[in-house]
Image: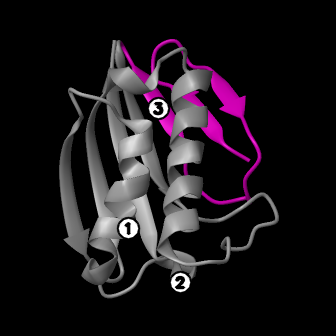
Amino acid sequence: MFTLSYATPARVINLPKPNLPFSDGILVGNTLYVAGQNGMGANEKMVSGGIAPQTKMALSKIQKVVHEAGFRMKDVVSTTVYLSNMNDYQKMNTIYRRYFRNPTPTRVTVQVARLALNANIEISAIAVK
């Protein structure tokens, strides 16, 4: 279940996700901060098939949070992509391009030793209206 918190005024939107101690999005003024999303499906398991389906799932969940806050994907100005294997960089980019058009958001992509729940990818985002 997703949770979207608003700093001022306070408002929470619950979307499907496991009971984890974080908000999926916090809206502060005209800026939306989206927590890192991974490839976990509604069944609370990572989608199978590797980096491409996990990237699609992560970006789909970001899109849901963005839309729940009344934003559009073109409002996303920055993302951070965490990969467990930098060899997945090109495959991730193939899916990423489907969600973001020019001008694309600024982005940092890093390889990490391990991600929560053994995910292959996690993506966070910032959107501004």
What residue is pinned by disc 3? 26
From the viewer's side, name the closer residue of 45 and 88: 88
Ranked by sequence position, the earlier of labels 2 and 1 is 1
Mark 2: few/some/many CA within 10 Å (<14, 14-19, 20+) = few
Q: Main secondary structure of the magenta part?
A: loop
Residue 23 visible (yes or no): no
Q: Position of residue 46 (x, y in %)?
A: 66, 73
Q: Is residue 22 visible?
A: yes
Where's the C terminus, which quadrant?
A: top left
Please tell me how crowded label 1 is: few (under 14), some (14-19), or many (20+) other residues with Cα within 10 Å: some
Mark 1 sits on what residue?
91
- In this rendering, the answer to whether 37 lies above or below 4 is below
Q: Is residue 61 above or below residue 105?
A: below
Q: Quadrant of residue 23?
A: top right
Numbered disc in front, either 3 or 2: 2
Image point 64% across, 39% down: which residue?
Answer: 3
Query: Mark 1 or 3 closer to N-term?
Result: 3
Q: What element does badge 2 sit on? A: helix
Number of residues whose C-alpha sits closer than 10 Å to that of mark 3, classed few (under 14), some (14–19) or many (20 or more): many
Q: Magenta residues, as a range?
A: 1-29
Q: Farthest residue in the bottom direction?
A: 113
Residue matched to label 2 = 118
Residue 19 on the magenta span = yes
**Picture layout, residue 90 above or below residue 56:** below
**Furthest residue toward right:** 43
First-in-chain label (3 vs 2) = 3
Label 1: state its secondary structure.
helix
> Which residue lies at the image location 34% right of the left edge and 76% below the top edge?
88
Q: CA distance from mark 2 to mark 1?
A: 18 Å
Give the Cα distance between marks 3 and 2.
25 Å
Position of residue 70 in the picture relative to residue 111 (left or right)? right
